[in-house]
Structures are given as structure tokens and as C-alpha cells.
Image: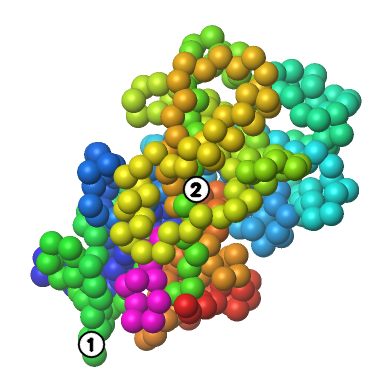
Amino acid sequence: MNQRFDVAVIGNGMIGAAATRYLSAAGLRVAGIGPGEPAQWQHHTGVFASHYDQGRITRIIDADALWGLLGKRAIEAYGEIEARSGIRFHGAASCLHVSPDPLAPGDTLLQAEQVGRDLNAAFTIERADEGLGEIFPFLHFPNSAMALWERGGAGYVNPRQLVQAQLTIATQQGATIIPEAVARLTTDAHGVTATTTTGQPIQAGKVLIAAGAYSGWLLDRPLDLRRKAVTVLLAELPPGEVNRLRALPSIIYRLDNHPVLASIYSVPPLVYPDGKTYLKIGGTLRNTHYVHTAAEIQTWFHGDGDPIEGDALRHVLLAMLPGLAVTTFQSKPCVVTYTAHDLPYIDQIDTAIYVAAGGCGSAAKSSNELGRIAARMVEKAGWDYDLPAERFAVRYA
């Protein structure tokens, strides 16, 4: 490929695809570089991504006001992205934030409630011993539980479809999508050359690295990224259960005194690529398992996740949905990349290299806005956003 680009975005995941769309909308010649989803995870020897999924929670309400604002701004853009791409990825199924005891030390539900009020989120407060059971009769929580029931645009996004929608619009705007992984970067007086694993050199004036867990390894000085190996559980549902749970919201639920999990999240039953309908549940482990190298990430994705975590998720799901009829359970591996300050790194590394990485478990819902921030930074060759740059500053390993 002899064409020279103004910007090469390395990573066609949720943040990278959004950045590619915004950069191409600015009239720049953009290459979005990143491989597609592996057909067979167990035999794939290249890079992996965690957006190979059908459902992630989207919401405004968050204990962190900045994450709440990012989510709000992202949700506001969903309709335009769907309309322009012709691809639907958003389901406004609502979201239930549940605490067994909002007054317990360390609980953040009341803090999240205030953020919701400050950002004008559409929600009500529901209690398990009052009206929550009437709204969702199929759900069970302790009588002491309190919940924030967020409506509006809260619910879920389909990551696969959201990425496709972003790249579809980017292509319409003239972006070039290159389905390869980048092996190394070299810089000279003219910019940056990204060489793919097949040896193809791609030249650009600037590069934005948005390669998820792999982002730091493309730099001479690695970033401080903490890669958590987590397990998600998919419960295949028969048609009768799908109909019974049609009103199921997305759920975030802090657990009390659970030996394995500090909290769980779930999304409503969704149709997956195999044509079956699954209810997905994941959680936050009390004892975190990290992966430190690309080889460890590959080994993790070649497996079925952690059986202990998968079993814990199954028990919590069956307790939360009493009488749930499940055809089969299957566990799947995932890697969630955290930064040193629990906000994404969106920063300029040197004259021609920029980074947008580290979703911290919340990037899916906010990915469009994170991509917009990064695109503006690259386009303007400096910070150009109404939040402090230092909140997103990189930290090195």
C-alpha cells in the first residue's frame, strides 16, 4: 500500500472505531488498522479484543461523575450513529443499580444517585420491601435492598454492531480499513510507519494507538496498564424463558459477604451469532487475576475462563432469578484493561504518537465520546476538550 495517511488509528475496537469516524469526518485521510474477530478463538495466535460480544450495559448513573458525563454524551449520539450507518446496536431496556444496603461502609449507591440527579438522568428510587418486586416480579433481592431504576437511554449496546456502525460511517467518509494487526512502529522526520504482522508498512503523519490491552507494548516506554482476566457466564434460555424475561433490565448489583464476587452485572437476554438466546452475567472478583504478557493473554483467551468464577456467577444468577430455566451454561474469557487512575489514558506521547487506551470496565458505554476526545486531540495536535487533560494523562510502567 503506497498511500500515505494523515492519521493511522491502530485498533478497530470500540474507542478506535469511534476515533476513526470522527477523524474522517474532519476531512483527514485516515487508516483504521486492526484485525477482525477470530473464527476459532482456541486456535488463534494473533491479538484478541473484548468487544467480541453482544451486550454491554449503557447508562448515565455512575458513582464517578466524570464517567456519568461521558456516558450521557455517548448515549446522546447513539441515534445519529444508528441512522447514518443503518445498523442498530442500542437497546433502551433500562438499568437497575442495586445495593443490599446503601448505608454500608464503602457503598456508592447514594453517591451514584447524586450523580444521576446532577446529570438529569431519568430514574426513580425503588426498594425491595416496597414496589421493586411488583415492577420486576421475576427478580429477587434482599428486603433491605435499594435500587436506582434508570430509564431513558439506559440499557445495553451491542459492541460488535456498534464497532461495525462506526466503521461503516468512517468508510462512507473516506476512511480506509486495514484488517491487520500492527507489529511495530517506527518514526522519522516525516511521521510514523506502522508495520503490520504481514510486513505491510503503513505511513502516516500521526498515529493514534487504541489497541486495548496491547496498547502499551507498541511504545518504547510501556504504559502502566493492569490487564484483568475475568470470566463471563452465558445462560442459554429456552423460548419460554425469553418471553417471561422480556422486561428484564440491565443490572448492576453489589454483593454483601460473597466469598468470590464483590458485585455482578447482567444484560437482558440477547440473540448471539449462533442463533441462540443467552442471558449474560459477569462480575468483579474480590481477588483479581492479572495477565502480564501477550502470551498470557493468548493462553487466557484459548481457555474457558475461571471455573470458580463461573460457578459463583451461576449461583448468583439463579438466586437473583429464582426458578430460571437454563438449557446450557457456558463460560467465556475476557480481559479488562485498567489504568493507574481508573480513567482512560487519552494523551499525546510525542510529536506524532497519541494514545487512547484503558477502558477500566466502563468504556463500552462511553466509547463514542472517548473516541471523540481522542480524535479532537489528534486533529488539533493538543488537548481540545472541556475536561482537564490531566484526568486522562498517561502513566508509565
The label nearer to you, 1 versus 2, is 2
Q: Is residue 224 magenta?
A: no
Locate residue 290, reporting x and y percent: 48, 59
Residue type, label 2: Val
Up-down: is 289 above or below 310?
Answer: below
| Residue located at (63% from left, 24% from top) | 318
Q: What secondary structure do most residues of the magenta stretch adopt?
A: helix
Q: Is residue 347 something that shows in the picture?
A: no
Residue at the extreme top: 240
| Residue located at (44% from left, 47% from top) | 334
Disc 2, SS: strand
Question: What segment is highlighted magenta in the picture?
Answer: 212-222
Q: Badge 1, how many Cα within 10 Å: few under 14, some, many 20+?
A: few
Disc 1, SS: strand
Left or right: where 16 falls relative to 321: left
Residue at the extreme bottom: 189
Q: Badge 2, how many Cα within 10 Å: few under 14, some, many 20+?
A: many
**Which image quadrant is residue 93 in?**
top right
Q: Nearer the viewer, residue 129 or 45?
A: 45
**Which image quadrant is residue 144 in?**
top right
Q: Which residue in the protein does label 1 denote?
A: 188
Q: Quadrant of the N terminus?
A: bottom left
